[in-house]
Image (cartoon, coloured by chain):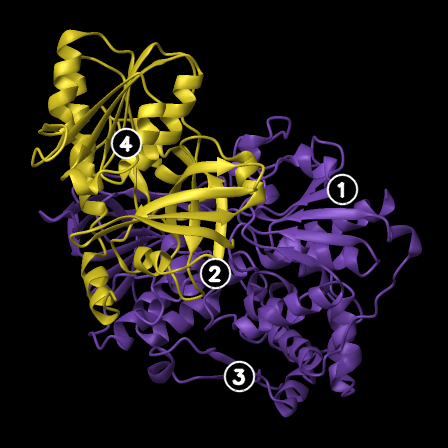
């Protein structure tokens, strides 16, 4: 008999849109068992091939069925350092779930029928977190004198540090912000990734002896050369992609037009949603527009909507995207959640010009309609402007979420570090070593905007080659 | 991050300008004139940029001078020697270009005088002839006259009310000087209306003019774009592309408006936490 997928429990849209608490509540033990029992345990499983780090999915699901959650946790931990985080933020519908045998062929993303691998991963991850299952350290004496500097405390940096520290390497992580976690802290809102989940991973690294140095901007306060001179034998760069792209259209510097990074950093990192208790302000729009179709666009929309609700305003937050819903790069779950909460969408819309008032605040966005043409290099159909389709949308706050580029400060301060046309760091794809001997890199600074799990994959590779050559 | 000394260098008629020296060994070794730091007073605080006015490498300390304006600068001003900041990061931004230009005018207004001091010293050391114009509302609010005197070949004081030096604006003196002589560079820091006027005057004389902009910032490392300014029609981030820009290219009206984007919240939070 075919079993229906087990739906995950969620806070009701009505209530959650008024707070920053976690939306997805995760599976209970019974729910996890039921969902795990749907897995066909394929002889030749396809799911793992869809996972960027190759988690043995069949095995961990089987272990859940056996109610051996501890083993399930350790099975995932063999490949992924952050099961609780990835179980929450991985775009599973484009990865493992899309590869699942239960996904119908030819779909752009997983069928609903595909096993909810990510929710099972989260279940196992949270089991490990709640039971303090520490991955055994494998200290090797020869590493005790090795010192490594990790620059950036985002997903790549944290992962690399963990891999090294478990072997006994002394690791210092340098972070320019006052809090650790990188994009996991400043970018992803707590209603999607609660801080205690992130803090668990950071605390674990601290227990392993990793030293966090916050408020330290490598490239300004110290150069790569000086880090080596200070006694580090290897350096890992997990600098991230934190430079916001703008549309480059007229009026974009009007007040209340935010980059998605500024908007999310104010709200997430600086807790502006608790102003004036916290001192960093953020403006709250009556008619909010979000430009873009990725996860950060969804995050911004749901944050803007929450600010409206908390402040007793009529909910009016709209996402405009130049293609259609199918082409949106965001996780399907985020799109669904945004819709349920009341975020509106308008597709095939291309921003043309912002119009402001005499005080310099944005009032309108002039747009053009488009239709889909031939596929471009990304394989997605290219939007083509329809002549004479100009129209206006009222907007008193706009968030631009159209992509992020590589952080440049350290790169500019290090001319020997070779970069590509996107200013991403060039590395050897096997060793992850950059053009500077002993300097490795991974995460968004290498591949451009990617996922947490992709960053982790690169960081693990780098850690492996650092260990091999130390 | 620990404060080693705190002094109110001005406390007159509701204006308070504070000088803080802080332990910051790495920053003191690296900081160059024109660069700034970001500070957070406490865990709930804002991240605000402040120019590094002086460094003492031997003591491993830096000096900041700021006027109490909003809540954050007021909280910062209320700290005492022995207290520590919650966060301090730097040095940030590009250093001011220091080389031999020839004859240089440094025009500082209000607390901006503090920000021209390190640049004046460095330019003087580089062999430039330095003329300083200091502008202040009145005699009681003038800061760092002796220090600037030591760093310049000539110095002119302008006060709005004529209570000290000459009555008038810094730009009045600037015009006079440019009428009489040719200068190779003007460097100006002060309130936006003042820098805007300086740039307008110097443009007529076709004299290169650098200004240090005080745009609002959050991370101040190029990640948020809050501090974006238009310079010759190009979007620049004050934090990583500046803070110094060619004053003739800056869109002053835009900057003025953008710096007021949170004026309502600023007023609100200042009312909630009234000054002592």
- Residue at coordinates 48% horizontally, 37% vertically from top-left? B55
Percent position of residue A283, x then y: 25, 61
Q: Are marks 3 and 4 on the same chain?
A: no
Location of residue B268 with respect to B54 vertically, above or below: below
Q: Which mark is residue B83?
A: 2
Eye-nearest disc, 4 or 2: 4
In whole angstroms, how far apart are the C-alphas of marks 3 and 4?
72 Å
| Callout 3: chain | A
Residue A234 is labelled as: 1
The quadrant in which the C terminus of chain A is found is: top right
Q: Are marks 3 and 2 on the same chain?
A: no
Labels 3 & 2 near each other (Cβ < 8 A): no
Horizontal relation, residue A246 to residue B31: left or right: left
Residue B98 location, quadrant? top left
Question: How far, Cα to Cα, is label 3 from label 2?
Answer: 52 Å
> Which of the numbered marks, if any, corresponds to residue B181?
none
Foreground: disc 3 or disc 2 = 2
The residue carrying mark 4 is: B145
Q: Give me the C-alpha separation between circle 2 and circle 1.
A: 36 Å
**Mark 3, other Cα within 10 Å: few <14 / some 14–19 / many ≥20:** few
Decide: marks 2, 1 in contact (CB < 8 A)? Answer: no
Residue lying at 64% horizontally and 92% vertically, measured from the top left = A30
Q: Residues within 10 Å of mark 2 (few under 14, many from 20)?
A: some
The image shows residue B51 at horizontal and vertical percentages of: 38, 40
Q: Are marks 4 and 2 in contact (CB under 8 Å)?
A: no
Q: Which residue is mark 3?
A: A7
């Amino acid at each position: 008999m075919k079993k229906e997928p087990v739906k995950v429990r969620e806070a009701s849209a009505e209530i959650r849109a008024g707070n920053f608490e976690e939306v997805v509540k995760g599976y209970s033990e019974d729910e996890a068992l039921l969902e795990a029992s749907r897995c066909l345990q394929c002889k030749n499983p396809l799911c793992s091939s869809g996972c960027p780090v190759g988690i043995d999915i069949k095995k961990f699901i089987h272990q859940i069925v056996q109610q051996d959650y501890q083993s399930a946790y350790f099975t995932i931990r063999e490949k992924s350092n952050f099961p609780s985080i990835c179980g929450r933020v991985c775009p599973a519908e484009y990865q493992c779930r899309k590869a699942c045998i239960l996904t119908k062929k030819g779909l752009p993303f997983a069928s609903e029928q595909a096993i909810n691998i990510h929710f099972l991963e989260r279940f196992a991850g949270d089991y490990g977190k709640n039971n303090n299952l520490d991955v055994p350290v494998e200290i090797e004496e020869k590493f005790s004198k090795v010192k490594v500097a990790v620059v950036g405390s985002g997903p790549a940096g944290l992962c690399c540090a963990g891999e090294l520290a478990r072997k006994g390497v002394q690791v210092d992580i340098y972070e320019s912000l006052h809090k650790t976690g990188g994009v996991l802290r400043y970018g992803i809102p707590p209603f999607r990734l609660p801080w205690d989940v992130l803090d668990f991973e950071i605390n674990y690294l601290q227990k392993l002896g990793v030293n966090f140095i916050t408020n330290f901007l490598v490239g300004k306060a110290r150069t790569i050369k000086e880090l080596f001179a200070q006694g580090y034998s290897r350096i890992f760069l997990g600098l991230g992609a934190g430079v916001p792209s703008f549309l480059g259209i007229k009026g974009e510097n009007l007040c209340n037009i935010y980059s998605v990074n500024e908007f999310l950093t104010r709200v997430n990192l600086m807790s502006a949603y608790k102003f004036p208790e916290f001192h960093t302000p953020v403006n709250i729009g009556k008619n909010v527009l979000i430009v873009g179709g990725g996860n950060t666009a969804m995050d911004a929309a749901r944050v803007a909507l929450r600010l409206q609700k908390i402040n007793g305003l009529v909910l009016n937050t709209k996402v405009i995207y130049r293609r259609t819903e199918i082409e949106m790069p965001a996780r399907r779950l985020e799109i669904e959640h945004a819709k349920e909460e009341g975020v509106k969408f308008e597709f095939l819309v291309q921003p043309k010009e912002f119009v402001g008032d005499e005080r310099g605040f944005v009032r309108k966005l002039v747009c053009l309609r488009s239709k889909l043409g031939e596929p471009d290099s990304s394989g997605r159909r290219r939007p083509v402007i329809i002549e004479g389709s100009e129209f206006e949308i009222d907007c008193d706050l706009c968030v631009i979420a159209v992509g992020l580029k590589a952080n440049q400060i350290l790169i500019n301060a290090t001319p020997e570090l070779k970069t590509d046309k996107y200013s991403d760091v060039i590395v050897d794809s096997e060793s992850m070593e950059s053009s500077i001997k002993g300097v490795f890199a991974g995460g968004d600074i290498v591949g451009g905007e990617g996922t947490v799990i992709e960053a982790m994959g690169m960081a693990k590779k780098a850690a492996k080659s650092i260990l091999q050559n130390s | 991050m620990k404060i080693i000394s705190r002094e109110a260098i001005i406390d007159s008629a509701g204006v308070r300008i504070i000088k803080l020296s802080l332990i910051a060994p790495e920053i003191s070794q690296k900081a160059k004139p024109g660069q700034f730091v970001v500070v957070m007073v406490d865990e709930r605080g804002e991240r605000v940029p402040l120019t590094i006015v002086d460094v003492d490498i031997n003591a491993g300390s830096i000096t900041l001078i700021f006027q109490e304006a909003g809540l954050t600068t007021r909280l910062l001003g209320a700290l005492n020697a022995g207290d520590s900041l919650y966060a301090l990061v730097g040095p940030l931004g590009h250093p001011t270009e220091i080389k031999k230009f020839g004859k240089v005018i440094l025009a500082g207004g209000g607390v901006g005088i503090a920000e021209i001091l390190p640049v004046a010293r460095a330019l003087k050391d580089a062999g430039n002839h330095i003329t300083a114009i200091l502008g202040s509302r009145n005699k009681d609010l003038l800061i760092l006259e002796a220090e600037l005197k030591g760093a310049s070949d000539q110095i002119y004081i302008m006060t709005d009310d004529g209570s000290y030096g000459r009555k008038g604006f810094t730009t009045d003196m600037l015009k006079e000087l440019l009428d009489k002589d040719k200068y190779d560079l003007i460097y100006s820091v002060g309130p936006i209306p003042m820098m805007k006027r300086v740039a307008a005057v110097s443009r007529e004389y076709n004299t290169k003019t650098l200004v240090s902009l005080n745009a609002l910032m959050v991370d101040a490392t190029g990640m948020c774009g809050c501090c974006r300014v238009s310079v010759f029609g190009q979007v620049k981030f004050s934090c990583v592309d500046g803070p110094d820009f060619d004053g003739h290219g800056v869109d002053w009206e835009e900057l003025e408006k953008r710096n007021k984007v949170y004026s309502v919240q600023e007023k609100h939070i200042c009312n909630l936490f009234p000054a002592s």
